[in-house]
Amino acid sequence: MLTLRRRISHEDVSAVGSADRPVLLATLDVPYSDEATAFAIDAAVESGKPLVVLNVAEVLPTTYSFLGYGYVEKQELQEALRKPAELARSLAVHVERLRVCSPHPVDALLEVVAEREPAVLVFGPERSQLSRRRYRKAERAVRERTSCLVWVA
């Protein structure tokens, strides 16, 4: 009679893989939705993980963009993007703010996700600030082309 023997492992597999994986809050050059901000900060606080706050902006390849002048910051947008980071810092969460400028913002977002390997990607642009088509296209790409947990409002 054949039996299946299992090798007994004494390794702690619960700690493998998620040691320093951050919570990543991402938007496409629009303010974050309130629900996404609350979820990302709660996830970072409860898990003790760092929070990466990411803004991906579309910058067309022109002569000025090659010289470093392709992205002009809007003061209102920068204040809105700073609020989640300040709130998380006030709750003792390590926060890193990133801005990525690219002619292909969704591809750039996916590249950052692949590099950072977050525990959770919170895709949270304010839907009223983006066209419906652009939002759906970005959401579909994020869902299909990432290997981490994804939260979408």
Image (cartoon, grey):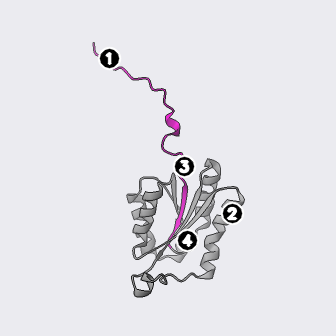
Give the mark, 2 or 3, whose residue is nearer the N terminus. 3
| Badge nearest the viewer, 4 or 2 | 2
Q: Residues within 10 Å of mark 2 (few under 14, many from 20)?
A: some
Q: Amino acid at mark 3?
A: Asp
| Numbered label attached to residue 3 | 1
Q: CA distance from mark 4 to mark 1?
A: 57 Å
- Which percent across, then down, holds residue 151? 51, 57
Q: Is residue 103 above or below residue 12?
A: below
Please state the horizontal and vertical placement of residue 132, each as a whole percent of the image: 45, 74
> Residue at image x 61%, y 63%?
37
Task: Specify start and end residues of the magenta stretch as a single range.
Answer: 1-28
Mark 4 vs mark 1: in front: 1
Q: Secondary structure at mark 2?
A: helix
- Identify the secondary structure beneath mark 3: loop
Q: Residue 87, which numbered label?
A: 2
Residue carrying label 3: 20
Q: Amino acid at mark 2?
A: Leu
Q: Which element type, helix, strand or loop, lies under badge 4?
A: loop
Residue shown at the point (66%, 69%) measured from the top left? 83
